[in-house]
Image: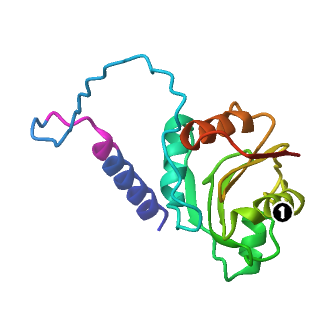
Amino acid sequence: MKKFIVLLLIVAALFNFAACQKSDNPNTDTTVTTVETTVSEPTPSTEPQTTLPPAGEDLDLFAIIDQIYEVEPIDFEVIDTEVDLSDNDNVKYFTGLDNADKIKGAVASEGAIMPSAYSLVLVQVKSAADKAEVAEEMLEGIDPFKWICVGAEDLQIVAQGDLIMLFMTSSEASQTSDDFVAAFTEILGETDLELKK
C-alpha cells in the first residue's frame, strides 16, 4: 500500500512538472496590446464639468461617481452599490441617516478588499431646502468605524444643489477628503455646504 501511494505521488509530481514547462508551440494564444498615449497639459477651467439638472429631477449618481474617479483616480478596487432606501439598516450603514424619508436616492462606493477604511456616498435629497438638515444628520449618524479593525478619521460632507457627498477615509490614506471635495467641486461647481468631523 505504501509503495502504491509513493508511486501515485511521483506520477502526480511528473504531471505537475510537465504542466509547468514553457511551451515552444508558436500557436499558443497570446494577445499583446499596444496603446499609444499622448500627454497634454490640462487647461484650467473655472466652469464645472457637469451641470446638475433642475432641482427635483433624478440624478445619475453612478455617473457622478465615475466622473469623480476620472478627476481623482484611485489605485484599488471599489464596489458601487445603490443604497436600498426601503431598508433602514442599509440606509443607516451607508449614510448615517435613520431612514430615507427626505432622500430620493443614494449610491455608495466602498473598497472591495482593502486594509483601510474608504467610503464615498452620494445622496440626492427630495428637497434642496432639507440638505443642511440631512447633511447634519449624516455627520452625526455615520459610524466612521463601521469596518472591522479599521476606521476613518478623515470625514467630510459637502453639498451642491440637492446633492450631498459624504467622504471618509483613513488618516493614513494617500488621498484625503480634501482631494475628493476638490474633484466634486471641479465636476459640479462650488459647494454650498461643507461639514467636517
**In the rendered view, would you say 111 is above or below 75?**
below
Q: Nearer the viewer, residue 59 or 113?
A: 59
Q: Nearer the viewer, residue 145 or 56?
A: 56
**In the rendered view, would you say 69 is above or below 81?**
above
The residue that mark 1 highlights is 133
Q: Is residue 85 left or right of residue 23?
A: right
Residue 176 in sight: no
Residue for point 81% across, 58% down? 132
Q: Position of residue 59 (x, y in %)?
A: 53, 62
Circle 1: residue type:
Glu
Q: Is residue 185 left or right of residue 130?
A: left
Residue 135 lies in what quarter of the image? bottom right
- Secondary structure found at label 1: helix
**In the rendered view, would you say 20 is above or below 79?**
above
Residue for point 70% across, 62% down? 128
Residue for point 66% across, 71% down? 126
**In the rendered view, would you say 71 is above or below 39?**
below
What residue range appears in magenta? 17-24
Inspect the magenta stretch and tell me whether residue 22 lies in it: yes
